[in-house]
Amino acid sequence: MIAAVISAGFFAYLKTGLPNNWITTSVVLVAIMLCPGFIPFAWAAGIEMEIPSLLVVGLIVTAINFALYAAIGVAYVKLRSWRERTAAT
């Protein structure tokens, strides 16, 4: 839910037609860091897409982010449990 609010904020900021300056560049870089699943679809940000196409892109980006953050979570849990086992012995 938080990611949806953040992405809506970025979308609204970028659709205001601001000139390219360091703030706009920073916003885009932060958006890509928070949502790495968007990288393959960066071309879609600059074109007007119809709603069905936009929804498909959004679902694919969501699936990529879900898989990426799930893998990060699994790796974190495994590392943490490995550290607890090695510290106990």
Image (tube, helix red, strand yellow):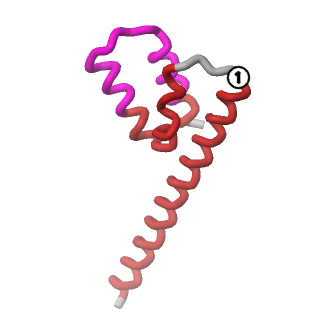
Quadrant position of residue 76: bottom left
Q: Residue furthest left?
A: 22
User: Residue at position x 68%, y 31% from top?
Assistant: 55
Point out the image quarter for the N terminus: top right
Residue at numbered disc 1: 51
Residue 31 falls left or right of residue 51: left
Q: Residue furthest right?
A: 52
Q: Say whether residue 24 is magenta.
A: yes
Question: Where does residue 5 sit, x and y in percent of width and height?
Answer: 55, 29
**Predominant SS of the magenta segment:** helix
* Residue 7 vs residue 61, the one in the foreground: 61
Question: Where does residue 30 sit, x and y in percent of width and height?
Answer: 37, 33
User: Residue at position x 35%, y 85% from top?
Assistant: 86
As displayed, is residue 36 above or below residue 30?
A: below
Query: What span is colored magenta in the figure?
Result: 7-29
Q: Residue furthest bottom?
A: 89
User: Residue at position x 41%, y 79% from top?
Assistant: 82
Question: Where does residue 83 sit, x and y in percent of width and height?
Answer: 36, 77
Q: Amino acid at mark 1?
A: Ile
